[in-house]
Amino acid sequence: MRRRVAVVSGGGTGIGAAIAGALVGDGYDVLIVGRRSEVLEATAQRSGVEWGRSGAVRPVTADLTDPEQVGRVVDALAGRKVDVLVNNAGGRRGGGTGTLADVAAYWRANLDANLLTAVLLTEALLPHLCRPGGRVILVSSVAAQRGGGGAYSAAKAALHGWAYDLAVELGPDEVTVNVVSPGYVADTEFSGERTTPEERARQVAGTLLGRVGTPEDVAAAVRYLASPAAAYVTGQVLGVNGGSVFGR
């Protein structure tokens, strides 16, 4: 039988690495994509050891804001079909004050990191998606639903509208498109860089479950959407936030 293939952007650390590990555990061969080759190599080796599947995770170093570098992912597929595409790359970019040029640079940096990376990678891989049965999953943020992140919130919210259009486009081919929207997740570079103990306590207090999220919580949601059990789920935003924001 053909071994299933998944592509996970931002797959070197945190949520992306957890998603890659979960998919390897489900039998996928996984391409993890990111800008830092050493981080990707270490994650690929660790995942292979943990699941006893050496070589199941392959790193692809590419800056997904650069259309020419996106082609490296297509090359790495070597003609194989993609069963699951997880657009997880992104992050909050600083700036935005001072001159209008500063504001423009701040907005462009956040849109590039969180929206354009997903658009370019998805467009490049659309011809390679399995039809029927392919899955496109976008990792957003609770900031898209409640604000508080400036240009980052806007960029993540843009993923939602684009996902709806993509779901309409790919629905006739029985390819599903969904968004996973995490709340505060500990043990990631994103949270570790900015979170004080006081902020962490505030985030916990804002949940209904009284705890922070983990990368594995988000990976479990992605794993569900990638599975046959979610074959009739498309055009949806799945919140993984401990109840800090209700579904709408």
Image (cartoon, rainbow, N blue to C red):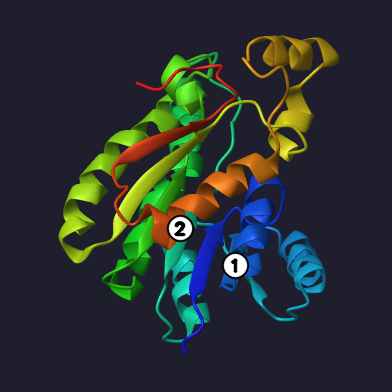
Do we see residue 25 in this rendering? yes
In this view, the residue in front, 33 or 55, is 55
Q: Return the mark for residue 129.
A: none
Q: In this view, does 150 lie to the left or right of 233?
A: right
Q: Residues within 10 Å of mark 2 (few under 14, many from 20)?
A: many
Figure quadrant of residue 80: bottom left
| Residue found 63% across the figure and 15% down from its top | 207
- Residue 95 at what x, y percent from top left? 58, 23
Q: Is residue 157 above or below residue 100?
A: below
Q: Return the mark for residue 226.
A: 2
| Residue found 45% across the figure and 18% down from its top | 246
* Residue type at the position of mark 2: Ala
Q: Is residue 64 above or below residue 27?
A: above
Cα separation between marks 1 and 2: 10 Å
Q: In this view, does 56 lie to the left or right of 31?
A: right
- Residue 168 at what x, y percent from top left? 18, 49
Residue position for label 1: 26
* Residue type at the position of mark 1: Asp
Q: The residue tagged with tag 1: helix, strand or loop?
A: loop
| Residue found 47% across the figure and 15% down from its top | 147
- Residue 12 at what x, y percent from top left? 69, 56
Contact, mark 1 vs mark 2 (Cβ under 8 Å) = yes
- Residue 78 at what x, y percent from top left? 47, 86
